[in-house]
Amino acid sequence: MYMCTYSVLGQTIVALVNPVLAKMYGPSAFAFIKNFIKYALLVGLYFGTVVVLYSIAVIKVPEYYNMGTPPVSLPVQAMMILLFQYFAVYLILSIVRTYTELNNHSATDIRLLAQGGSNGASKLGIFMHNVETMTKATMQTLELIPLLAVLFIAARFRAVEVRPDTGAVQGWAGDCMFLIAYSLMFMAVMCAIIPYYSGELIDLEFEKALTDVMGESGNKSNGGAGAAMHNARREQMKKVLKEREHQRNLRIAKALTGAKQWMELLITGGTIGVCVSIVTIGP
């Protein structure tokens, strides 16, 4: 627990000092050292979190109490699911952001590579750019996790207060917690998939095919008026091809967006259920 606490403190200090160093010595100054410290603290945070979760699962009541070990409570189980999602998404985002910072790949560089242009990016850069786009889309789901975790803790505390012998929440309240946890997980998956169908990701094969079509069209015309007409036709063709590809996938994106909204309704309903359980729980 102390390891987690000091790791978060260290990350906060690094985040505060980083802009000052970037302004004084440039954005790339001490990049290796900063990333080493950041990942050392990140490893400490994740290691401490895993150890704490493991201790929750394996802790036993001492034998001199002459009683069995109670199972892990439903609120804690639901919180463990939320924590897994929270830390998994942030770990992926940290990795892809570090790759982008170290390689200085801009979105323009990545798209030029996909179209066959020559630059310092790589196919791995395209993959990392797409992963970063998909991961950022899931960030809206992570904003709810701290609030939901506090709500689950409140429900657990209230159950311990009212039922000191077991400290168990109502069964239907536990169902509401799991409904929230799994709905939020499915919502995160949908948020990650939507950019693929909405055209926000870089499709390597499509960009190359589009470039080939443009190149073949460009070889057929040259000269002043002919070049101007070719450029106009090229832009029109490019717009039509991209619009067809976009419209083909947009239907799927809309369907996923509708499903995501249903998940939001389930999360809202589960949250209301947990709040009602806190108020109505009895001995």
Image (cartoon, helix red, strand yellow):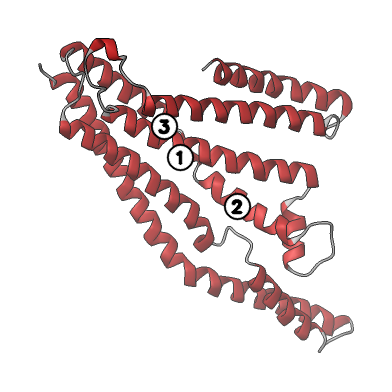
For numbered disc 1, what is the local secondary structure?
Answer: helix
Percent across and percent down for residue 31 are: 81, 33
Query: If you read the primary sequence from the N terminus, does the residue marked by circle 2 or circle 1 appear first?
Result: 1
Q: Secondary structure at mark 2?
A: helix
Which one is nearer the viewer's eye here, 91 or 126?
91
Which residue lies at the image location 27% right of the left edge and 43% below the top edge?
266
Q: At 71% from the left edge and 82% from the top edge, which residue is drawn?
A: 213
Q: Residue at x 56, y 62 (%)?
A: 199
x, y percentage for residue 77? Answer: 33, 32
Q: Residues within 10 Å of mark 3 (few under 14, many from 20)?
A: some
Q: Are marks 1 and 3 in contact (CB under 8 Å)?
A: yes
Residue 62 picture quarter: top left
What is the distance, in whole Å, between disc 1 and disc 3 at their CAs?
9 Å
Q: Amino acid at mark 2?
A: Val
| Amino acid bearing label 1 | Gln
Mark 3 residue element: helix
Q: Earlier in the sequence, mark 1 or mark 3?
A: 1
CA gap, disc 2 and disc 1:
16 Å
The mark found on residue 85 in the picture is: 1
Give the alpha-carbon distance from disc 3 to disc 2, as whole Å: 22 Å
Using a 10 Å C-alpha cutoff, classify the residue at mark 2 as few (fewer than 14 neighbours), some (14 to 19) or many (20 or more).
Answer: some
Residue at image point 38% right, 27% down: 58
Horizontally, is 234 left or right of 266 in the view? Answer: right
Badge 2 is on which residue? 131
Q: Quadrant of the C terminus?
A: top left
Residue where numbered disc 3 is placed = 145
Apparent side of residue 188 relative to residue 264 in the rendered image (left or right): right
- In the image shown, does 118 or 50 lie closer to the viewer? 50
